Amino acid sequence: MKTLVSLIALAIAAPTSAQTIAVTHAEAWTLEGDMPVRDATIVIADGKIVSVTSGGAVPDGATVIDARGRPVTPGFVNAATQIGLVEVSGSGDTRDTASTDERNAGFDMSSALNGNSTLVSLARADGITRALVYPSASRFAPFNGEAAMVRLRDGSDIRDAADVGVYAVIGGGAWERLGSRAVQWAALRKALADARPSPTPEKGKGKKDKRGGPPPPGKRAGEALIRAVLRGEVPLAIQTHRESDIRQAAALAREFGIRVVIVGGAEAWRAADELAAAKVAVVLDPQANLPGSFDQLGARQDNATLLRRAGVAVAIGLAGGNIHSNYNAGMALREGAGLAVSNGLSWIEGLRAVTTAPLAIWGRGGGTLAPGADADLVVWDGDPLEPSSIAVRVIIEGREVSNRSRQDVLAERYKDAR
């Protein structure tokens, strides 16, 4: 009896991702090169990619998904969105994006993430498996709070990693009550300088500055994360568009020796060489071809192409503007990547901009179909950068998840209505 109970307990405790899946006859875009593996068998076990082999064998007992020659890619990643924090923007009880706390550099909005949001299932149905979620502008410049990475698995818990970076906004009218944006840059530099450790004094020449060690009691929340930025452990994200601000961001990266990510960057193409030299990455919206403000007068749809030619790391986020970046976060992302390709970016670079590049920029890594990689992948019925294509099967963490959205349910419910 004890043996039976033990076996039942082990079965219950075993992770559901432990199943073995074989995706057969796939056009597998592994992103380890520029071409796919044809007629590939992708073997998945324990939540990881085991192998990707042309004409490979199917392991005994594996669940088989026949791709029928269709494209299979890593799961798509939206590099800047607020999925899980916003349900209906006009309803305050469904918005958990901003802080009113002065200690906003350490504001962690990830505890409010709602995996049951209908926007999550909609994005997943469009092949999105992960996303960078950022906080909205807070009451105090320059910081908004912490960015987080989410994984759009089934269920309410979608938080994958908190403390992914520090998020700030410069310009765009968000801080007009502070006066000149010079005040904003000064505040940002001061926060970084104040958190920077002082050099240890020589023996007998004074006491060691406490800023060189752990933060003493009473320090502002978020200072530890700012120190992580200074140590190069996480990036500083600056949402900004104007060329002069983008050049300031590049100068900031050089001055403090930190990783900076520009989010938005409508005029980033004008500073492409400087961004490349400072190793500043850009998360942009290829759909932005008209200025939404005076900061975006230089917006153009070949922004991504010009930046990549200069050697700047580029990912796609904020796709489709303020509404579609949340409500159609998957469709807008794919359409944005397709528009970037139609404006000069190579197709494979467009695919990387929504898979490996976002994870690299935000310090997570991965996003390929290589052996040992996380088993997040999508089977498509056509070109994944074409908005009319559909995600036929979606696998996250080695498990097939539902790709049905609320729209699907409503369509089925009312299909016979007259």
Image (spheres, grey):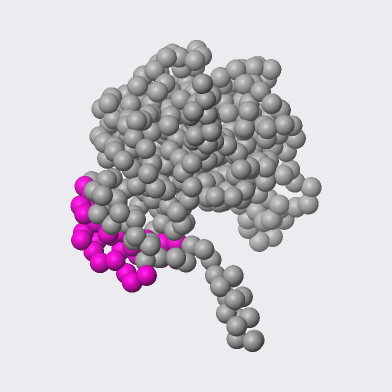
The magenta stretch spans which residues?
35-61
Coordinates of residue 224 in the picture (x, y in percent): 65, 49
Q: Residue at x 73, y 38 (%)?
A: 103
Q: Nearer the viewer, residue 5 or 163?
A: 5
363 over 407 or under it: above or below: below
232 over 323 or under it: above or below: below
**From the image, which quarter does the N terminus lie in?**
bottom right
Q: Residue at x 24, y 61 (%)?
A: 53
Q: Would you identify the image quadrant in which residue 343 lies?
A: top left
Q: Residue at x 66, y 61 (%)?
A: 203
Coordinates of residue 177 in the picture (x, y in percent): 69, 17
Q: How many marks?
A: 0
User: Can residue 265 be seen by looking at this rendering?
Assistant: no
- Left or right: 258 in relation to 387: right
- Left or right: 137 in relation to 366: right
199 over 191 or under it: above or below: below
Q: Residue at x 61, y 43 (%)?
A: 116
